[in-house]
Image: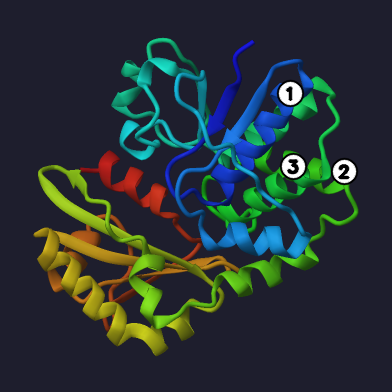
Amino acid sequence: MSQTIVTSYCNPDLDGVAASYAYAEFLQKTGQKANYYIEGEPKKEVDIVCNLFHISLSSCQEIENSPVIIVDTNTIRDIPKCIAINNIVEVIDHHIPSQDLEKFSKAKVQIELLGAVATLIAEKFYQSNIPISRNSAILLYYAIISNSINLNSRNTSVKDRKISQWLKEQFSEISEQYIQTIFEQKSEINESDLRLEMEAEYILEIANKKIIIAQLEIVNANSLLENYQHEIKSILIDILQEKKLDYIFLNCIDILNGYCILYTPFSSTEEYLNNFFEGSFENGQLIIEPLFMRKEIIKLLKDNT
């Protein structure tokens, strides 16, 4: 029996790692041979949760010619280059369906627009009444919390809340008291890593305009912008020039207080965003409450252009 590999996009966040890890466990417990694979360097939050709860990840190394399940993305450009499209047998995601889905001709597809793909994986244990391991429960719970900004994002669903509560009930170690610790550690940013933390390299093309939306998810967004606005401004200016963009801005999310600040050093970007958001920019900043996640902003821009 061939081994099925569960993986996510390259350099995955906690949601992608948790979903890969836990779905491989689910498949094993339903009699299938399965493992998970992590391509690249996971986001900082993965190390934070694993270190806090003493979880060791041991990704498999070989995936060529194996059946592959993709979680937390449905876009071909995001997945590891070593994966042959014809080997993809299943796609589980919570993002807007992409045109690439047409190319996954052999794949079973499950896409639900909610807070985290971790919710869909945990739901499989819940519905099948299959016991979930400590590690999978911890990873999935904090993935839901992280991805939905502590259940405050606009796309947080009833299902996210129900399943996160069920996960919390499985093991006493899972507690809300760790959420602030995780978010605070996630907010520790080195100036030298600021551009990397902002994840500001992917270009959107909307109505023939080239746009980049950077994003930071931190504790106390106001303080970060006060302390790093000069550095952030320089980074955004550099990226706009390097990539010949029409618009660029930062979505700075306050992960404890549930609001976000849009920041841009460009008046043209301010004028563009004024078509979609109420309020006025001051010193390049626009406060929005309740918060918008980047994926929600992208949908807003596409739907209203």
- Relative to 187, does residue 211 appear above or below in the rendering? above
Task: Report the amino acid beneath label 2.
Answer: Gln
Determine which quarter of the picture holds residue 287: bottom left
Left or right relative to 255: residue 33: right
Residue 86: x, y in percent? 38, 15
Which label sits on residue 28?
Answer: 1
- How far is disc 1 from disc 3 in space, using C-alphas? 13 Å
Q: Quadrant of the N terminus?
A: top right
Residue 198: x, y in percent? 37, 66
Q: Residue at x 40, y 48 (%)?
A: 295
Is residue 110 shown to the viewer in this render? Answer: no
Left or right relative to 122: residue 274: left
Q: Quadrant of the C terminus?
A: top left
Task: Report the amino acid beneath label 1.
Answer: Gln
The residue carrying mark 2 is 170
Q: In the structure shown, which secondary structural element does the residue marked by tag 1 occupy?
A: helix
- How far is disc 1 from disc 2 in space, using C-alphas? 20 Å
Q: In the structure shown, which secondary structural element does the residue marked by tag 2 occupy?
A: helix
